[in-house]
Amino acid sequence: MKILVLGGDGFCGWPTALHLSNLGHDVTIVDNLSRRNIDNELETNSLTPIATMSKRLEAWKRATGRTIGFERLDIAKNYHRLLTLITETEPDSIVHFAEQRAAPYSMKSPMHKRYTVENNLTATHNVLCAIVESGLDIHLAHLGTMGVYGYGTAGMKIPEGYLPIEVVTDDGERVRQDILYPANPGSIYHMTKTQDQLFFAYYAKNDRLRITDLHQGIVWGTNTPETLLDDALVNRFDYDGDYGTVLNRFLMQAAVGYPITVHGTGGQTRAFIHITDTVRCVQLALENPPDRGSKVKILNQMTETHRVRDLAKIVVDVAGGEIANVPNPRNEDAENDLNVRNDLFLDLGLNPTTLSNGLLDEVTSIARRYVDRADLTRIPCTSVWTDQQDPGIPSTAGE
Ligand code: NAD
Ligand code: USQ
């Protein structure tokens, strides 16, 4: 397959591009390197030393003999360059990772809210519009989020995208329908993903585009078999208060001896997936596209759920350290249960990496190895959801 990986310099996109290339696909990465610039803005950096794009691609060629193309391009701003790239390369599939993905970053200020909305919605719409204008029958696989559903249900398992409902017509007839599961975003970032869903539903209906939307949980871990082939291929590891996600943050905090920052009571339950399963799921999604004319294919890309305070305890058991309950900077339910269906990927053959078999390796091979690169002043989450909140970071944390 010829595949464009939009956002292929990022945490999920880079190992996915390598995995697809290793399978023999002809891969081109498209990225504007905005994520690297955001690190400059936030005065932080990946815990792992990530190489420049040229060095990454040279190392890949050295390690495998395979070539991955790279186009530095802003897909939200350079519509015509994106269209030209699509018409010239004629890809079979496009994988779309290229959005601003941090909820705390999206809530930092009006500027960050507006950037996230403008970047994510225009990026997604440009991709859809360009596929239609190219006239090519391209399968689009997009990385969405579990957060489109919110994190609670009326007691049932969250279905894969669609909620079966029954309506009663004026004649008293009962009619069954599948509707998009009601959106309940918890941040501006998550809200952009709920809007993406409507773009996809419209373009699948009106233009018969083949679209898969992968509702992914929180990704943890760092490396995949491909990123381990050379030090210059190492994946990024975010630990700062905006981009670091909860489990990787806890692992890093335990490794550096920083009290583990559980927000509030830690009663929040979330869905998780290891990065090696992310890349495998994208492969499975590309190998099993929807038919032309069918509705958007939605899969829940997650393998297990955990409560935040339980994660903290698991990490302490594996790596030592202590737990600090800090005031929650977010506006979210203090406690929730979360049950999620993920049969579609299991049926396609996904064999999940679970916390129990991946955690210790992550602590020793990443968090402890790169401990000297950690800047502890970047750990606190200072982005608050409303101006009524005070992040209230204890002044002793990490000292
Ligand atoms: P990331 O920030 O590491 O990577 C995103 C990449 O897209 C970056 O390299 C960035 O430079 C690029 N990009 C952003 N806007 C662009 C634009 N307008 N034009 C070109 N390139 C652009 O994020 P990630 O963790 O790899 O996430 C990838 C996707 O997966 C996101 O859409 C995110 O919402 C989704 N996702 C991530 C997680 C997670 O835990 N990391 C979980 C669920 C879903
Ligand atoms: N949390 C803590 N302590 C911390 C950091 C986070 O208790 O130090 C808590 C948060 O308050 C939240 C939970 O952990 O309740 C998850 O936070 P997170 O930052 O790990 O995840 P989130 O903001 O939801 O975003 C991440 C990715 C996003 C993706 C989403 C999937 O950044 O791109 O869409 O996970 S999901 O959570 O399933 O919606």
Image (tube, rainbow, N blue to C red):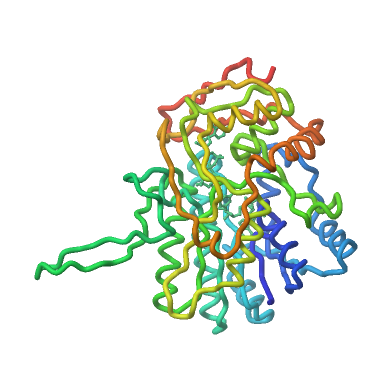
Most extreme residue toward the top is: 396
The one of 52 and 178 positioned closer to us in this rendering: 178
The one of 261 and 77 positioned closer to us in this rendering: 261
Q: Position of residue 266 (x, y in %)?
A: 50, 29
In the figure, residue 142 lies in which quadrant?
bottom right
Q: Residue at x 67, y 72 (%)?
A: 3
Q: Position of residue 388 (x, y in %)?
A: 40, 27
Q: Is residue 66 above or below residue 291?
A: above
Most extreme residue toward the bottom is: 135
Q: Position of residue 174 (x, y in %)?
A: 18, 67
The quarter of the image that holds ligand 1 is bottom right
In the figure, residue 310 lies in which quadrant?
top right
Q: Is residue 90 above or below residue 102?
A: below
Quarter of the picture holding the N terminus? bottom right
Is 241 on the left or on the right of 298, as rendered? right
Q: Is residue 123 visible?
A: no
Q: Position of residue 320 (x, y in %)?
A: 70, 24
